Amino acid sequence: MTAYSDRAPASPETRILAALLLTIAGMLVSVVGGVQSHSLALLSDAGHMLADAAALGLALVAQRVASRPRTGLRTYGWRRAETLAAFVNAILLGVASVWIVLEAIERWQDPPDVRGGVMLAVAIFGLLVNLAAAAILSGGHTHNANTRVALAHVAADAAGSLAAIVAAALVLGLGWRRADPLISIVLAAMIFWGSWRLVVRTVDVLMEGTPKGLEPAALEATIRETPGVCELHDLHAWTISEGFDVVTVHVTLDGTRHGADVSQDVCERIRARHGINHATVQAEHPRSTGFYQPISTLGRRRAPAGGARAGRPL
C-alpha cells in the first residue's frame, strides 16, 4: 500500500469561502480607516470590497447550485448557474467603478483634509489581505469561471489598496490632498475595464457562441476528413459552462462504412484534435436525387396498357 502525505487541494468552493471571509475583514478595516482618515481612496476601496463580498457570496451560492444533479426539467443540470453568477459579478464591478468616479469628482472639487498616516497603515493592511486571498484562489488544480472571477475581484481590490498606498505617500510627502481622488479615478478605470472583459466573456457563453479557441473551419475539416463521411450539415458548437464544450452535427454517409462506426470515429477525432469530449453525431444515408425503384420490382416486365398480357411477337 502506498501512503500519500500530501493534503488534497482545496476545492473551488472552499477557496471562494476563504476569499470571502478575508474580503469582509479587509472591508471592515477599510471602512473604519476611511472614516478616521477622511480618505476617499479607502472608502471607495471599502465600497468596492462590499461589492466584491456580495459577488463572492453569489459565486459561492452558484458553485453549490452548479454541483446539483441534473433533472428531467434541466437535463444539463445547473451548470449555467456559474456563468450567470459570473455575469452578475461583472456588472457589480462596473457599478462600483462608476460610484468611485462620481465620488472622486466631488472630492476633487472640494478635497478634504486626509490623515496620511492612518490611510497608509490601513492601505498596507488591505493589500496584505488581498494578496493572501489571491494566493488562496490561485492555488490548487481545479478552477472554473467563478474562481477566475473571484480572483479578478481580489486583484482589483489589491490594485485599490496599492493605489491608496500611493495616494497616502503623496499626501504625507507632498501634502497634495487631490492625490486621493485622482488615484481613485485611475483605480475606477482599471476596475471598469476588467468588468467589461468579464461581461463580454460571459455574454458569449450565455448566447451560445463558439467555444473560445475553437476554429469552426478546422472543426468542419476534421469531420469531413473522417472516412465514410460524404457531407455534413447542422454543425453547432457552444459552451454549456466553463470546461464543458459541446458539438452536434449531422453527417451524410458515402456508403463505405457503417453509420455507427463513422459516428464513433468522428467523435474520437473531435476529442483528439479539439479537446471536446461531448459530441453528438447523427449519421444519415445519402439522399438519392434520381429515380428510385424498389428492389421487389426488379426483373418484372411492365404490363401493356389496357391490362392485356404482353406476348412474344410472331
Image (cartoon, rainbow, N blue to C red):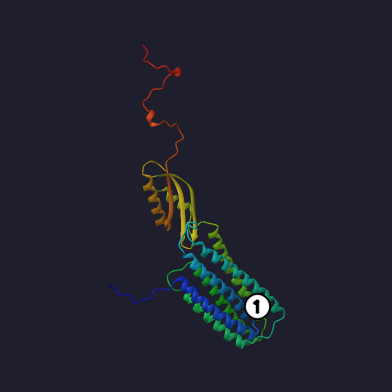
Residue 165 seen by the camera: no
Residue 94 at x, y percent in the picture: 61, 69
* Residue found 47% across the figure and 76% down from its top: 136
- Quarter holding the N terminus is bottom left
- 104 lies left or right of 209: right
- 111 lies left or right of 88: right
The number of numbered badges drawn on the structure is 1
The image quadrant of residue 160 is: bottom right
| Residue farthest right in this picture | 109
Residue 109 at x, y percent in the picture: 72, 78
Amino acid at the residue labelled 1: Leu
6, above or below 71, in the image: below
* Residue found 65% across the figure and 73% down from its top: 99
- Quarter holding the C terminus is top left
**Residue nearest the observer in this picture, 276 or 176:** 276
| Residue farthest left in this picture | 1
* Residue found 64% across the figure and 82% down from its top: 39
- The residue where tag 1 is placed is 182
| Residue farthest front in this picture | 72
